[in-house]
Image: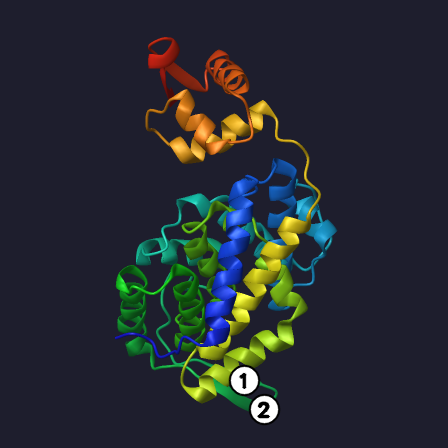
Amino acid sequence: MKPPYSITPNILELVSSISTKLGAINATHLQAPKTELRRSNTIQTIQASLGIEGNTLSIDQVTALVNNKRVMAPKKDILEVQNAIKVYDALPMFKSASVSSFLKAHQLMMNGLVSSSGKFRSAGAGIVKGSKLTHLAPKANMVKPLMNDLFTYLKKDQDLLLIKSCVFHYELEFIHPFEDGNGRMGRLWQTVILKELNPIFSFLPVESIIKQKQVEYYSSLEHSDKSGNSTLFIEFMLEIIDKALEEQLQLPRKPITAEERIDMFRNIADQNKFTRKDYLNYFKDISSATASRDLKLAADLKMIRKSGDKRTATYRYI
């Protein structure tokens, strides 16, 4: 059964804006940011997503833990960050439409924090603010069938992946499938879904903007609960994604080196054969001579294997 939501003019406008920004990112090859930017963005993501859940560690403390340095902080907060580091290191391995992959991510995220890490809850659950119950989740015996339906929607529905990622995020929060860790899993899995649309989403610090708009984030969840559909939450999350992409495009850019081009093209070619023309079609702003030098360098560094010669030459990443 398809989750309830409507495609509004605002959603269509945001999708168009995001698509335009993704086109600009593809054209400037920002979808594979430099190593230091990727690292910085991941640290921001971890600190923000856990901060939303009450973790007290600062950016500097998270950076220290990423660098395997000691930090003076509550043990639980340190463990949450250490677990999140493992999760984001494993991000490329997660498959968005796989329930087992989803449960593995939760096991890594909540290891040592709850006894049921990597397992759906077996008891009732709800969200309480102060003395008020703001959300009563579906009964425990409904969790598995509801999550199976949600993954089926993700795999088979024809709506845009951008929209489905927002719907999945909301429905996960509504179902509340775990004893704990639902919020961070909702934000993580939206990233897992979106990285299959464009690699930039693996490194885009969307959670940092959510943290800045934390009140609006929870308000949009509550409003969607009351209205019985996720439309408002979809609009909110698309606005967040649009803003995150805009910030990425505004960052100062340095020229891409030959080594960076070679590394970036690996994601495009994968294990398939390619030619110098294929390489040039991707990097449209370089000359044939530069492409030849790049490929020679990659062969010398034993990153690719060359077959044939001159115009008939083909290459494959090792």
Image: 72 above or below 141:
above
Position of the N terminus, as image quadrant, is bottom left
Position of the C terminus, as image quadrant, is top left
Disc 2 designates what residue?
131
| Residue 316 showing in the rendered view | yes
Q: Position of residue 144 (x, y in %)?
A: 29, 70
Q: Position of residue 71 (x, y in %)?
A: 71, 49
Image: 254 above or below 96:
above
Disc 1 designates what residue?
128
Q: Secondary structure at mark 2?
A: loop
Q: Residues within 10 Å of mark 1 (few under 14, many from 20)?
A: few
Question: Which residue appears at 56% of the width and 91% of the height?
Answer: 132
Q: Position of residue 54 (x, y in %)?
A: 64, 68
| Residue 76 showing in the rendered view | no
Could you tell whether 189 is left or right of 153 in the image? Answer: right
Question: Which residue appears at 50% of the width and 26% of the height?
Answer: 262
Could you tell whether 189 is left or right of 157 in the image? Answer: right
Q: Find the distance from the CA under tag 1 to the CA under tag 2.
A: 7 Å
Residue type at numbered disc 1: Val
Question: Which residue appears at 40% of the width and 86% of the height?
Answer: 228
Q: Position of residue 53 (x, y in %)?
A: 60, 68
Q: Secondary structure at mark 1?
A: strand
Residue 196 badge: none
Residue type at numbered disc 2: Ser
**In front: 213, or 178?**
213
**In front: 42, or 266?**
266
Q: Residues within 10 Å of mark 2 (few under 14, many from 20)?
A: few
Image: 262 above or below 310:
below
**In front: 274, or 140?**
274
Question: What is the image's colouring?
Answer: rainbow
Contact check, label 1 and label 2, Cβ < 8 Å = yes
